[in-house]
Image: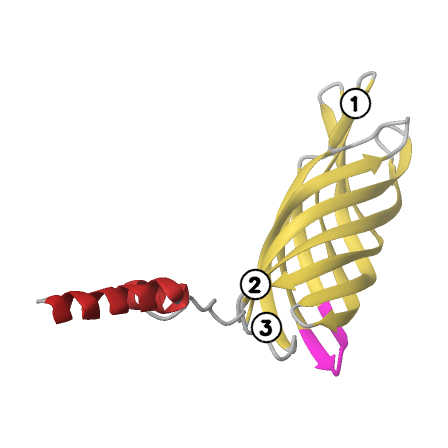
Amino acid sequence: MKNTTIAAGLVAAALLASPTGAADLRYGAPYQAPPPYAVPQTWTGPYVGANIGYQFGSAALSMSPSGFVGGLQAGYNYQINQFVIGAETDFQVSGADDTFAAYKFSNPWFGTLRGRVGWAMNNVLIYGTGGFAYGRGEVEWLGWSQTKTHTGWAAGAGIEVAFSPNWSARAEYLYVDLAKENYTMIGLNTDIESSIVRFGLNYRF
């Protein structure tokens, strides 16, 4: 019995002298963090997505047609080392409008067709964009209305972050300048200039 007691005491002393060993016996091997997310090897390929944001605009008669905006986008990227080029088209539905006296002016929808140039850093893509733009303007006055289709250009910049092999999120600023059209019914000649801040989600194939 005495020998058993001495042996048990030696084992306890050894465990106390080696906390790591005790922890190992109680909890198993030390915790190891999971490997970091493996970022995509390339941004090359097609993608589709959706976006939502806000439009700040200006038009004739000091009107500022502004409101929430949202839509869909699709495009294609091609990566060469860290350099990324591509093309994108989007179509937006907008709640941007404003009033002046009896006039109400709105920009119910617009779209763009743009090129993109960017720089990839692992799963982060910083890019600039620019190209063709088009959109609808509508004037309402004393129960009458007239619509015109404007054309122009768009330019902006953004950042996109891939958070899985197929999904990425982005934030983007876009300036859209739609050239003047003459609304003959009320003698109003106006363009539509807009700044858009939007956030999007893309699925990359």
Q: Nearer the viewer, residue 111 or 84?
A: 84
Real-space CA distance between mark 2 and mark 1, rounded to the nearest whole angstrom: 42 Å
Q: What label does residue 39 carry, if any?
A: 3
The question of residue 126 being in magenta is answered with no
Q: Nearer the viewer, residue 18 or 79?
A: 18
Q: Main secondary structure of the magenta part?
A: strand
Q: Are marks 2 and 3 in contact (CB under 8 Å)?
A: no
Q: Which residue is mark 1?
A: 99
Closer mark to the observer between disc 1 and disc 3: 3
Q: What label does residue 163 carry, if any?
A: 2
Q: What residue range appears in magenta? A: 77-87
Mark 1: which secondary structure? strand
Mark positioned earlier in the residue sequence (2 or 3): 3
* Residue 13, position as x, y percentages in the image: 31, 64
- Type of amino acid at the residue the image marks with label 2: Phe
The image quadrant that residue 196 belongs to is top right
Mark positioned earlier in the residue sequence (2 or 1): 1
Mark 2: which secondary structure? loop
